[in-house]
């Protein structure tokens, strides 16, 4: 289990929620453009959902929900369960999470700019990302084991 997020990280994440609400789809669209430079990762995604903008909107909403509830994670139980199921259905594994981080954090800075997406803000988002990723990775491992009858 990951260490709890620091109070400073929680405060920064919550403070960025309005920017995510305004620019979230642009951030996730740019994130996916970076992520899909890897053809193997691109093949894991429904391209129709990408082309329609559905997937970037869905991810932007999930990130915003996380930012707004980062201090009340119990509010995200259902969303996390749905993400885990979707990830297991599409073959997401622990090794994919660094690729997403490497695409997401630069996309945040690219869209919000260096004044808003300072090193401190990106460090907080990195901490928050890996906190959630660790939860998802653990639950996905359990779901994979369950599917395999382990």
Image (spheres, rainbow, N blue to C red):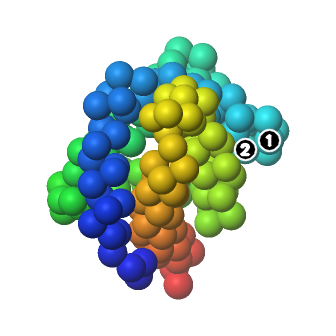
> In the rendered image, which residue does mark 1 sit on?
38
Return the residue nearer the eye: 106 or 29. 106
Residue 125 at what x, y percent from top left? 46, 52
- The percent coordinates of residue 82 (x first, y second) are 36, 50
Q: In the image, is 130 to the left or to the right of 92?
A: left
Write down the residue under mark 2.
41
Residue 111, placed above or below residue 34:
above
Q: Where is residue 93 in the image (x, y as percent from the top left)?
A: 63, 62
> Quick check: can you spot residue 90?
no
Q: Which residue lies furthest to the top in this view?
A: 52
What residue is drawn where x is 66% and y is 58%?
Answer: 98
Q: Residue furthest front?
A: 115
Residue 38 placement: quadrant = top right
Residue 121 appears in the picture as rendered: yes
Q: Quadrant of the N terminus?
A: bottom left
Q: How crowded is mark 2: few (under 14 residues within 10 Å), some or many (20 or more)?
A: some
């Amino acid at each position: 289990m990951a260490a709890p997020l620091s109070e400073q990280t929680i405060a920064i994440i919550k403070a960025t929620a309005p920017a995510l609400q305004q620019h979230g789809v642009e951030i996730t669209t740019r994130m996916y453009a970076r992520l899909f430079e890897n053809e193997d990762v691109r093949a894991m995604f429904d391209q129709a959902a990408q082309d329609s903008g559905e997937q970037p909107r869905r991810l932007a909403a999930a990130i915003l929900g996380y930012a707004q509830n980062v201090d009340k994670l119990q509010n995200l139980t259902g969303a996390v369960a749905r993400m885990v199921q979707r990830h297991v259905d599409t073959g997401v594994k622990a090794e994919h999470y660094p690729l997403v981080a490497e695409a997401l954090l630069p996309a945040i800075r690219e869209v919000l700019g260096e004044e808003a997406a300072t090193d401190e803000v990106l460090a907080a988002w990195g901490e928050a990302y890996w906190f959630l990723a660790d939860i998802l990775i653990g639950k996905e491992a359990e779901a994979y084991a369950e599917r395999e009858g382990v």
